[in-house]
Image (tube, rainbow, N blue to C red):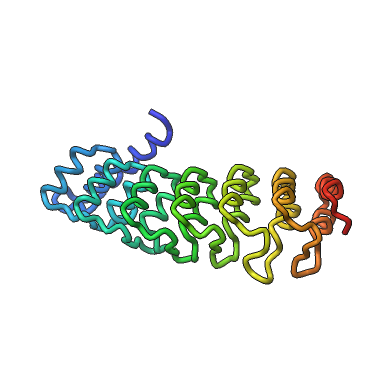
Amino acid sequence: MGPETRRLAVVAALLTVSWPAAAQPEGLHATILSGDAANVRAILAAGADVNGPGELGTPLHVAALRDDAAIATILLDRGADIEAVSEPYGLRPLHVAASYGSPAVAALLLARGAEIDPVELSGRTPLVLAATLGHLEVARALLVQGAEVDAAAKDGFTPLDFAILRGSRDLAVLLLDHGASLEPVYVNSPTPVVKAAKAGRPELIELLVERGAALSARDLSGRTALMEAEACGRPEIADLLRRLGATE
């Protein structure tokens, strides 16, 4: 049993024992966490609320957490609300699939008509969450279905910004291939290449320049990528930028 399986088993056990047997709103949730599809069917047939909320959201949120497309299908076929919102963060099942790196459930939810760019409490779409946490396959599934590639949370960070911060060239390539902007989404934001210089990401700088990023672009304080690298004490990044053509 791997560490993730053990973690889910512990969570399931805790949920099961924390409620009286006759009134377990989490009984269905615990069974989903255990991956027992047959018992999920039995519990639903006995009258359990397919949208009953618990500590982890609705049953569909729980299936999304563990990327169990088979159980998610059972829940949806029984009328699970595909856009159910869990408190306190306003997460829908697709947000959970994006956060936990659950590509199978993400694909299922999208195929069943889930809204592709809903925002949770902090303004993050599923794609922003997938990029924040580095879940490449979920990001791919969302982009193929038309997710807004330049969606930004309330803090102004886009999926490409998070790819840069994570140093994930594969994620950045995926986003750029789907039209991610090389310019700031917000007027007062630095360009992606300035952010890559500040973060010290040589592979991302080379990629962005290859895709057409302007090294002469300045942030709100007037700094170019080269100026940012020098100000941050990154001589190797400054040398790279000069080799790529930066002069100021």
Q: Image quarter for residue 230?
A: bottom right
- Image vertical order of residue 99 relative to residue 121, above or below: above
Front-most of 233 and 156?
A: 156
The x and y percentages for residue 47 are 12, 52
- Image vertical order of residue 54 relative to residue 137, above or below: below
Query: Is 227 on the left-hand or right-hand side of 164?
Result: right
Which residue is located at x 23 percent, y 39 percent? Answer: 37
Query: Is 154 on the left-hand or right-hand side of 63?
Result: right
Q: Quadrant of the C terminus?
A: bottom right
The x and y percentages for residue 142 are 46, 51
Farthest residue, direction left:
46
The x and y percentages for residue 191 are 70, 61
The x and y percentages for residue 175 are 58, 51
Q: Quadrant of the N terminus?
A: top left
Query: Is 165 on the left-hand or right-hand side of 240?
Result: left
Which residue is located at x 49 percent, y 66 percent? Answer: 123
Q: How many marks?
A: 0
Front-most of 246 and 19?
A: 246
